[in-house]
Each structure stands twice: as structure tokens, then as C-alpha cells.
Image (cartoon, rainbow, N blue to C red):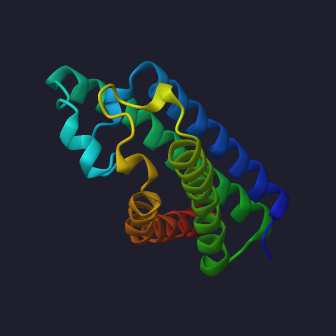
Amino acid sequence: MLNLPLLLTHSLIGILAISGIIFTVGLKRPRWFLEKKNVPPDILAAVPPRTEAQRRQSLWAAIPLAFGLLGLVFYSTYTFGQVSGAGFGLLFLHAFILILVVSTFDLVVIDWLLLNTITPRQFVYPGTEGFAGYKDYGFHGRAHLRALLGQAIFAALAAGVVMLLV
């Protein structure tokens, strides 16, 4: 049986962490997000590409974020495994649900509500005001769908490692 309080607590931590980082970077260094996977094509085509320094900086920002979120998934799955003695299936389900909750929050609240629906001017690249990409809900939906396989693989990996450790 899943431990819903643990799952919800760790999901909230993941949501707060990713939201804080996305908002901070979005407001302070929005050009770090200028990548094909993050920005609709019409906007990406109208904004000058990132400099080499911006590419390096965005990588250095992405690495701790990725390791932090991956670490949270491992920690949460390990903690669940220790407390429950669950097998691979439940460990996988725990890890996958945690990933999906954080990803779904990112999609629904940050991407669709904030960026697509509200579109605050602080998140609009200069010279791209009114571009159709800011209202392209499908762009973000497709990006999240493309990530599902990788998320499932990582959840399986987390569950497998926890099985070896517990």
C-alpha cells in the first residue's frame, strides 16, 4: 500500500523546489530557458540565440536542479521502501507518482496557467509580445508527453536501486 502522507509531503517539496527555481531563473535569467524544448518555435526564432556564456550558466543551473529532483525521488522511494518493505511494483509506483505530481504541477500551473493563460509581461521576451506561441498550450503538453518515457525509466531505476539497498 502506498504511503500517501509521505508521497504528498515529498511531492510538495519537489513542487516548491522546482517552482522556486523556475520563477527565480524566469525572472532573473530568462534567456537560460531559450531552448527548443522550452520555448515555442515562433518565439525562439524571434529572439537572438543564447551566448556561449548563457549556455554554460544554464547548464550549471540545470545540473543542481536535476540532481536535486532525482535525489528527492531516490530519497523518497528509499524511505518508502524502508518503512513499507514494498516490492518493485509499489516502489516504481511511488517514484513514478512523485515524478508525475511534480511534472503535472509544472505543466498545469506554471506552463498552462501562468505562461499560456496569464502570460505576465515579466515572462515575455522583448520583441515577442503577442506571439501565438505564448498561447500554444499544445507545445507544453507535447513536451511533457515526450518526457513520460524517461520519467518511467527513471522511476524503474529508482525502484530497482532501492530494491538492492533495502
User: 81 above or below 126?
Assistant: below
Q: How many badges with numbers are in the image?
A: 0
**Residue at 72% across, 46% down:** 12
Where is residue 59? Give x, y as percent: 30, 33
Whether residue 113 is visible here, answered yes or no, is yes
Where is residue 39? Give x, y as percent: 33, 46
**Residue at 57% across, 63% down:** 162
Q: Is residue 100 left or right of residue 127?
A: right
Where is residue 51? Give x, y as percent: 16, 24
- Residue located farthest toward the right when viewing the structure as drawn: 5
**Residue at 73% across, 61% down:** 80
For the C terminus, the image quarter is bottom right
Camera-side residue: 1 or 151? 151
Q: Is residue 97 left or right of residue 69?
A: right
Q: Quadrant of residue 91?
A: bottom right
Camera-side residue: 30 or 66? 30
Whether residue 60 is visible here, answered yes or no, is no
For the N terminus, the image quarter is bottom right
Q: Is residue 6 left or right of residue 38?
A: right
